[in-house]
Structures are given as C-alpha cells and as structure tokens.
Image (cartoon, rainbow, N blue to C red):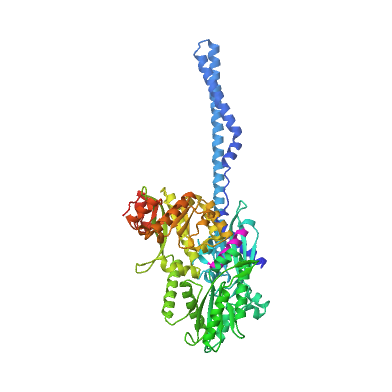
C-alpha cells in the first residue's frame, strides 16, 4: 500500500507539473561579452582619443605660423595622429572579428539547447501520456483536486463508480457525490492541505440505494515550488473483503448504532421470502426533522436518540417480527398478528410511544415521528411490494404535515409513478444543468430604485414549458438533491456577479434562497474558495433562509451565520410569519433583512388587526436596524398602505414579474422601475 501511494503521488505530481519542468535558457551573453572585450575596448578608446588630440595639435601648429620648427612638429603630430587612427581601426577590426566568432558560438549553443529542449519536451509528453494511460486503466478511483476542491483529473474508475458516468472536471464534491460524504471528504481534504501530511480514512458506504461497501481513502497534498500545497491527490480501494474476513457475518447485517437489522440485512431477508404471509404489516417509520435534531444535539447525542427509538420499537414488538434501521432516520418493521384491529391499535400505540420525550445527558428532548403502513395481501403480495407501498404512505404522511400514521391505499399507485417521474426529471435537470434562473427585483418604493434581484430556479422542459420550484423543492429536500440545487444556484449567482465586475458593469445584488441542509462546513469551504478567488463578489450577494425551517436552538448553526457575515455577505430571513414568527429571537440572529410573507400582505387593506401586527413588526425591525421587505405586493392599494406603515422595500408583481437573468439588460441600464 505504501509503494502504491508513492507511485500515485509521483503520477499526480508529474501530471500537474509537466508543463513547468522545461529547461531554462541562460541569459548571460551580454555580461560575458563585456568582460571578454574590456581591455580591447579601453585600447580602442585610448587610441582614438590620442589620434584626435594629435590631429588637433598638428592643425593648430600649422595655423600659427611660428616658423619652420613648428611646421615640422605639426607634420610629426599629424603623422602620429594617422598612426593612432590606424591602430584604432585595427583594434576595432579585432573586436568585430571576435564578436562574430562569439555570436557563432552562441548560435551553436542556442541550437544545441533548443534541440535539448525539444527532446526534453517530447520525453515529458511521452511520460505524461504513459502516466495518464496508467492512471486511467487502474481499477480503483483516483483523482486530483486543486486547493479549491475542484476536480482536475479523475480516472475512469472514479467516473463510473462514483459519478454515474458524469464528467467530474471542474466540479466539486457537492456536485458529484452522495450528500452524506460531502462534509467528511471536505474535512479530510482540508487536513491534507493544511498539514501537508497524508490523510487515511476508512469509511463505510452504507446508503439506502447502494450495497454496503468499505473503502480506504488516502489523500496526499501536492506541494508547489514555493512549498505551499497546490492540490490533493486521492485514491480509494475497496477493503470490504478485508473487513468481512475480520467481522462475523451476522455483524455485517446489523446496524452498528441500534443493533437492529441494517439495509443489507433487510434486503437479504426480503429476497429470501417468496411471498408475504396473510396479514403481515409493513410499517415505515421516519423521525421528523431528524437532520435538524442531529445537527442541534451533535452526532453522539443523535445516536443516543436513535438507540432510544430502537429500544421502544423492541419493547413494542413480538417474537419473530422483523425490525430494521435502513437509513439515518428511517426504520422498517414487518409485524404479524392474527387480528388486524389489534395490530392497528399496536401501531397507533407505538406511534404514541415514540413521540414521548427522551432524556439525553439529563436533558429532555421532544420529537415526533411519521408512519407509513401497508399490509398483505391488499397492498402487495411480497415483502418488497409492501415496503415500497409503505414508503409511499410515509411520503403522504410527511406531505400532510408529519406526526401521523398514514395507511396506503391503491389510489397511490398513480401518485407514486408521478413522483418517480418528477424525481427523474429533477435528477436529469441537475445532472445536465437544464436549470434556468429567473430574477425578480426588490424595489425601494420611495424612488423606484432596484435594491436587489431574488434568484428563482426553473426547470426548462424539452417542449419549452417551465417547471416552477413549488413543484420540486420539497422533493429535492426529501431525497437530498437540494444541496446540489443550492450549489448550482450559488455558483451561478457568484459567476454572474464576477462577470458583471469583469465587464465593468456595476452589479445589482443577487439574493439566493438556500435550504437549511446547505448551511454547513461545505458551504463555508465554498465561500472560502471564492474569498481567495475574488472577494469583491460578496459585496453583491445575499443569502436567504426560510423562517419556518430555522432550528430552535443550535449554536453551530448560529456560528455558521456569523461566519457568513464575516465574508460581508448579507443575510435575509425569508417568509417571516410562516413559522413561529418568534420576534424575541430576532436580536440574536445576524440577519440584516426580514421579508414579510405574502400572507401578511394579501388582505392587508381589509384587516385593521393585520395592519397593527405588520406595523409592530416594522417598528421592531427599525429599532433593530433590520431592513424589512414586503413580499407579494400586487396592487397599488397594498403598495400605498405598506409604504404608509413604514415598509419601503417592495417585491411583487406591482413592479415586475420574474424574468430570465439573461434578459435584464434594461434593468441593469435603468436601475429603476415604476409601479405597473
């Protein structure tokens, strides 16, 4: 393994630096020439000077008419002057001849060096081709990243095994890999870059949609001529066989946290059962908002919560029933009982038991769960069908508000097909970047000036139709695609701002609404890379978070917000009023902008009580120096009333509908809009 790492490190270093290893041509010809001809040049100057002086003296004596002696002496001086001139000419000829000979030698040396450089360049190209071929044909994933986390080179094994055939060049982990790996990979890359030491990680790939696999991932920093880390070479080898040889077979089918059956074990069990027994019930359980709970409590406390849930499930189960944990927050149970009514009561009782608070480190935590239930033979004849249909029922439980038991019925078949088609469209749109960005302006109604543009994503269909975010955002958050979607939106906005700056156009600030899932270390690493690349773009960037998705108490999340503010990025609290509208928490949040949800605005002229509520929020925000924006303003009447209440920043159809970001030259030029 050590030799393998050294070989790969050499491959990476050569591929990255082949172009920089060309021989350098010495630039010392002028210095050598000056040193060689210093004596002759001094003699030439001296002879020329004396010849001139003798000639001047001779002509002066001839013009003085002092007698024969002076004339004779003048002739001697003229003769000496001519002699000095001949000597100077001889010295000049000597210098010229030697210069020509030296030029010929330098030309010969230059030709020799050029030939050496061509030979060296050809050898480097040949070595580069050989090394590239070697790397591409190795059976395990190998990759090179720059220090900003972008992939420079990756072999076919990496592309096929980890990227589903997508070209990784120029992309980041967040755009390519399973969301569960992104944070771990970013941390290991950062360690390799900052310490310069090899980083070795053994990790279990145990995703719901994949067979469990153990991988050993090694990373090595590539160091430039200045001693600074310029990139990371990584490679991964499958060590599942080694792990399996050292672990009992029963342990491979068991979840390490809860000791219940894992995804692999459940899949194997389902495959071994030809048909579901009459009356078998599949219960698909999800811990509501577990991601938020886990981030708030920390991973250790999150594991404790999972253990409590597993213990309650065990207490409610009967001998011979199948219990499993198949993903971070999902459990699948196969329950059996003769009486359907009593089993229904058991499921309701289990739901009530799981919703009871748990004590972790002497602190009580409350949470809720959602259940999806399907039973044989009405909802399926095999365990696989029951599990699939219970999953559909669970999806509807979440859709209807969570914290409930939802039973499958056959009308859901068409719904499941539509959801699958929608998910496939979303995956394809993200993979092929078939996404359009539309923008809607935020206006200062006092002067009509455009303060910012909110970016809104659309999916462009082949027939020209647009799919709007209300159709797919919830689905993206459920299946983890929201992180890739957020990355696309953020990167597109930053690239647009940079494009405006490079072309000399004063940018209009762009606002991006990010999911809570994206507020993590990966986001901060992304922003750090842009900080190095072009920090000026942050002066024109706003990040929005929806109010009802904020965690209750989360120190890490709050710290992330403050870190983002240090980049000079403005933070906005979107859709205020759709959640708890907890005004008491506003002072602790580092938001500069609060966007009132349109539910406050839509009936404002007809509701004095609503006007009083809005006025109190506006006054509080003014005290806290928070800019308040009214969303969904569609009429002149509402616009006038909101302005009178003290909210001067407006977003809505009364000024403009969203339009493609590629079609806003008129807004960039005018910088103002009037109410329509």
- Tell me: 676 left or right of 79: left
* Displayed quadrant of residue 237: bottom right
The stretch drawn in magenta includes residue 303 = no
- Tell me: 485 left or right of 133: left
What is the x, y in percent for residue 77? 55, 19
Most foreground residue, 346 or 113: 346
Magenta part of the chain: 177-192
The stretch drawn in magenta includes residue 186 = yes
State the quadrant of the N terminus: bottom right
What is the x, y in percent for residue 520? 55, 61
Residue at position x 57%, y 80% in the image: 266
In the displayed structure, would residue 501 be above or below residue 304?
above
Res 203 visible: no
Q: Main secondary structure of the magenta part?
A: helix
What is the x, y in percent for residue 388? 49, 80
* Displayed quadrant of residue 254: bottom right
Most foreground residue, 65 or 485: 485
In the displayed structure, would residue 605 be above or below residue 240?
above
């Amino acid at each position: 393994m050590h030799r393998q790492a050294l070989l790969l490190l050499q491959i990476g270093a050569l591929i990255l630096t082949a172009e920089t290893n060309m021989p350098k041509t010495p630039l010392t010809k002028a210095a050598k020439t000056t040193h060689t001809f210093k004596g002759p040049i001094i003699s030439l100057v001296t002879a020329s000077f004396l010849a001139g002086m003798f000639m001047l003296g001779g002509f002066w004596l001839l013009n003085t008419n002092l007698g024969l002696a002076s004339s004779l002496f003048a002739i001697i001086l003229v003769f000496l002057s001519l002699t000095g001139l001949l000597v100077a000419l001889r010295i000049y000829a000597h210098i010229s001849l030697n210069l020509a000979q030296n030029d010929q030698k330098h030309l010969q040396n230059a030709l020799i060096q050029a030939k050496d450089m061509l030979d060296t360049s050809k050898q480097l190209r040949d070595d580069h081709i050989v090394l590239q071929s070697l790397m591409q044909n190795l059976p395990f994933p190998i990759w090179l990243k720059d220090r900003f986390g972008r992939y420079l080179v990756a072999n076919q094994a990496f592309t096929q095994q980890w990227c589903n055939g997508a070209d990784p060049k120029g992309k980041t982990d967040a755009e390519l890999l399973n969301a569960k790996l992104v944070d771990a990979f970013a941390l290991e890359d950062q360690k390799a870059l900052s310490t310069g030491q090899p980083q070795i990680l053994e990790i279990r790939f145990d995703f719901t949609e994949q067979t469990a696999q153990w991988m050993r991932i090694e990373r090595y920093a590539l160091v430039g001529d200045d001693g600074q880390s310029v990139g990371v070479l990584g490679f991964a080898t499958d060590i599942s066989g080694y792990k399996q040889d050292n672990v009992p077979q029963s342990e491979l089918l068991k979840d390490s946290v809860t000791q219940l059956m894992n995804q692999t074990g459940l899949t194997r069990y389902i495959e071994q059962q030809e048909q579901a027994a009459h009356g078998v019930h599949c219960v698909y359980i999800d811990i509501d908002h577990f991601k938020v709970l886990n981030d708030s409590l920390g991973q250790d406390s999150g594991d404790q919560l999972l253990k409590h849930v597993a213990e309650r499930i065990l207490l409610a189960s009967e001998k011979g029933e199948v219990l499993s944990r198949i993903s971070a927050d999902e459990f699948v149970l196969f329950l059996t009982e003769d009486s359907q009514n009593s089993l229904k009561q058991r499921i309701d009782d289990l739901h009530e038991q799981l919703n009871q608070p748990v004590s972790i480190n002497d602190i009580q935590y409350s949470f809720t769960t959602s259940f999806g239930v399907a039973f044989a033979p009405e909802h399926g004849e095999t365990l696989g069908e029951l599990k699939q249909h219970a999953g559909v029922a669970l999806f509807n439980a979440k859709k209807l508000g969570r914290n409930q038991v939802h039973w499958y019925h056959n009308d859901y078949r068409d719904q499941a097909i539509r959801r699958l088609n929608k998910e496939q469209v979303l995956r394809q749109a993200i993979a092929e970047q078939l996404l359009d960005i539309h923008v809607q302006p935020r206006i200062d109604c006092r002067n009509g000036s455009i303060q910012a543009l909110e970016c809104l994503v659309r999916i462009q269909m082949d027939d020209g139709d647009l799919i709007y975010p209300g159709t797919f955002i919830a689905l993206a958050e459920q299946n983890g695609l929201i992180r890739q979607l957020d990355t696309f939106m953020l990167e597109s906005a930053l690239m647009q701002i940079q494009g405006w700056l490079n072309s000399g156009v004063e940018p209009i600030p762009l606002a991006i609404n990010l999911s809570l899932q994206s507020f993590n270390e990966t986001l901060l690493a992304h922003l750090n890379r842009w900080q190095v690349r072009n920090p000026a773009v942050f002066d024109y960037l706003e990040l929005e978070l929806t109010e009802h998705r904020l965690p209750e108490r989360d120190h890490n999340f709050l710290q992330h917000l403050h870190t983002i503010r240090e980049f000079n990025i403005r933070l906005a609290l979107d859709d205020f009023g759709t959640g708890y509208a907890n005004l008491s928490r506003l002072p602790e949040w580092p938001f500069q902008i609060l966007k009132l949800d349109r539910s406050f605005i839509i009936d404002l002229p007809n509701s004095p009580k609503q006007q009083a509520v809005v006025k109190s929020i506006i006054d509080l925000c003014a005290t806290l120096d928070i800019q308040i924006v009214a969303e969904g303003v569609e009429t002149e009447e509402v616009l006038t009333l909101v302005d009178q209440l003290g909210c001067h920043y407006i977003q809505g159809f009364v000024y403009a509908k969203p339009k493609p970001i590629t079609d806003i030259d008129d807004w960039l030029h005018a910088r103002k809009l009037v109410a329509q």
